Amino acid sequence: MGQIVLYKNNSEDYALTKSLSAQITLDSCVFKDDSSVENPNIVISTGADITECNYMYIADLHRYYFIREIGVVRAGVYYVRGHVDVLSTYANEIKACNAIIARQENVYNMYLDDPEFKTLNKSQVVTKRFSGGSFTKNMQYVLVVAGG
């Protein structure tokens, strides 16, 4: 198999863009028989200590993976079990998507009713009595509304 890059991931698993450090680039590794594209099991031969790595990129598969387990087979030979990180693998496709967002944390419209967003809405009613003027005994109602 081709090139594999091992990283230390400093981000949460649900982050679309990961903060990666401490990379180790290896030119060869071998897939185990019980591997899949989503959950690869590989054997790595290297003199470097990879036990601190928790993230990897496999160039032949064009995917990023969380490292779920690292085992030592013998000195300089490691067994690595991974699980695909679909967010980072398909980050460009996700960013290119258009969507209609029903709710959002920072951008909102106070004029739209949202039962999940609690607001305080006090009504203000003012009744004024007119003395004299052009009102007659024939009752008429005048409604004045401001601001809404």
Image (cartoon, rainbow, N blue to C red):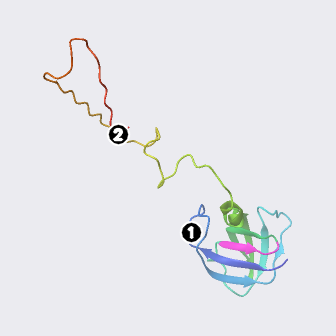
Which quadrant of the view contains residue 11?
bottom right
The magenta stretch spans residue 147 = no
- The amino acid type, in three-letter code, at marker 1 is Ser
In the picture, measured across the screen, residue 138 lies left or right of residue 86, that is left
In the current view of this chain or complex, which residue is farthest to the bottom?
47
User: x and y percent of residue 36 in the render?
Assistant: 82, 62
Measured in 3D between alpha carbons, the distance from the residue under mark 2 to the one under mark 1, in whole angstroms, is: 46 Å
Can residue 41 be seen in this snapshot? yes
User: Which residue range is magenta in the image?
Assistant: 55-60
Q: Secondary structure at mark 1?
A: loop
User: x and y percent of residue 55 in the render?
Assistant: 66, 72
Q: Main secondary structure of the magenta part?
A: strand
In the picture, measured across the screen, residue 103 lies left or right of residue 89, that is left
Residue at 71%, 69% (x, y): give it. Answer: 64
Q: Where does label 2 land, which residue?
A: 147
In the picture, measured across the screen, residue 44 lies left or right of residue 130, that is right
In the picture, measured across the screen, residue 115 lies left or right of residue 27, that is left
Of labels 2 and 1, the one closer to you: 2
Q: Where does label 1 land, which residue?
A: 11
User: x and y percent of residue 98 in the render?
Assistant: 66, 55
The answer to which of 126 and 77 lies nearer the viewer is: 126
Residue at 69%, 86% (x, y): give it. Answer: 48
